[in-house]
Image: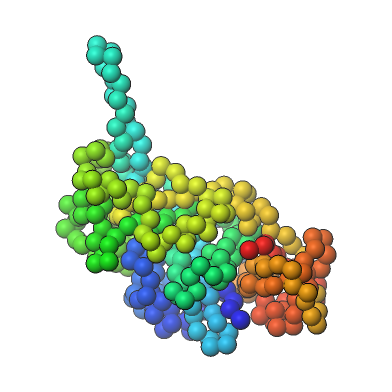
Amino acid sequence: MLVLRPVELTDLPQLQQLARDSLVGVTSLPDDSERLREKILDSCDSFGKDVEGNGPENYFFVLEDLTTQRLTGCSEVLATAGFSEPFYSLRNRHFTSASRELNIEHGVPALSLCHDLSGHTLLRGFHIDAELARTPFSELLSRARLLFIAAHTARFSDSVITEIVGYSDEQGQSPFWDALGKHFFDLPYVEAERLCGLESRAFLAELMPQYPIYVPMLPQAAQDCIGRIHPDGQEAFDILEREGFETNSYIDLFDGGPTLYARTANIRSIARSHTGAAQVVESIDARGSYLVSNDSLKDYRAIVAELAYTVGQPVGLSAEMCATLNVTDGSPIRLITL
């Protein structure tokens, strides 16, 4: 059985292997043992805090195969993007110019460096082993974070964003970066993303141009990357799009990947999840597939389960499911259909 749970310090060696295998552009998962150790300790501290509002907390989850004790994925929730330093992105909007004498009005798309998205809750760090891609466990890894938010809404913002990794080729070249960022840093795309993961995006963003960049002046290959998703990032996009997330006018300042946005209360796994009391049963006449979680904080657990659930009735779980979720008869359970 696979379970999603908070990261622990003993996960460090396996987590670093996940970092090595992750997609270029997933900057929140650096292949650096000391930085990963800091992230783990920060997450453990966040889960242990008694807070009444969204702050700098970062909640780091791992997906573990209990049979092999192997980590097969990870994902994160940052309670407040830009809490400690500005969360930079590029705003893609039209600038309109007009001439009354010529009776001409023309709109030109332009990219402007901004930190408009600071203050939102940020989903990040999604990575799953290739053999589990497009399975219910991808849904678990992504959406169980949303069930966690539903159980602890006071810890998060009233809106949620996520950045989807933008296009780069098999050699790790990003046409968007080569046309824009590279001129200000003289760094390859892969190295810029690595530095961002090790440090922060703030010092890199501070070197970006402070004036609007008119999109038609960029090479066509770079223009084509604006809002374009890396093929390996498509699943992360699709899952959240089904949750009600929508693209907006913001893109990643390194690779031009799209940003998704949703009001927290409108997200499907938050708005439509049900709660009930756990009930240990000997057999289950399964009628549907569900994501199931407890409502704990530092002992949070979530699984995929085949259940026979009726709204308003106890949630029948096998003894193995209850043990995996760390619940007993009567414990609160949250679930949503796959």
Question: In the rendered image, which quarter is residue 27 located in?
Answer: bottom left
x%, y% of residue 150?
A: 64, 58
- Residue at the farthest right position: 313
Question: Residue 20 at what x, y percent from top left?
Answer: 35, 76
Q: Give percent across and percent down for residue 74.
A: 48, 71
Q: Determine whether, in the image, residue 333 is placed left or right of residue 216.
A: right
Please tell me which residue lies in front, 114 or 247.
Answer: 247
Q: Residue at x 64, y 56 (%)?
A: 270
Image point (52%, 53%), residue name: 241
- Identified at 26% across, 58% down, the residue is 174
Instruction: Out of 93 and 197, give the one closest to the viewer.
Output: 93
With 119 as the anchor, is 244 left or right in this view? right
Residue 317 visible in the current orientation: yes
Q: Is residue 287 above or below residue 112?
A: below
Vertical comparison of 91 with 32: above or below: above
Image quarter where the N terminus lies is bottom right
Q: Residue at x 46, y 46 (%)?
A: 247
Furthest-bottom residue in this view = 68
Residue 8 located left or right of residue 208:
right
Query: Could you tell me which quadrant the C terminus lies in?
Result: bottom right
x, y percent for residue 10:
48, 84
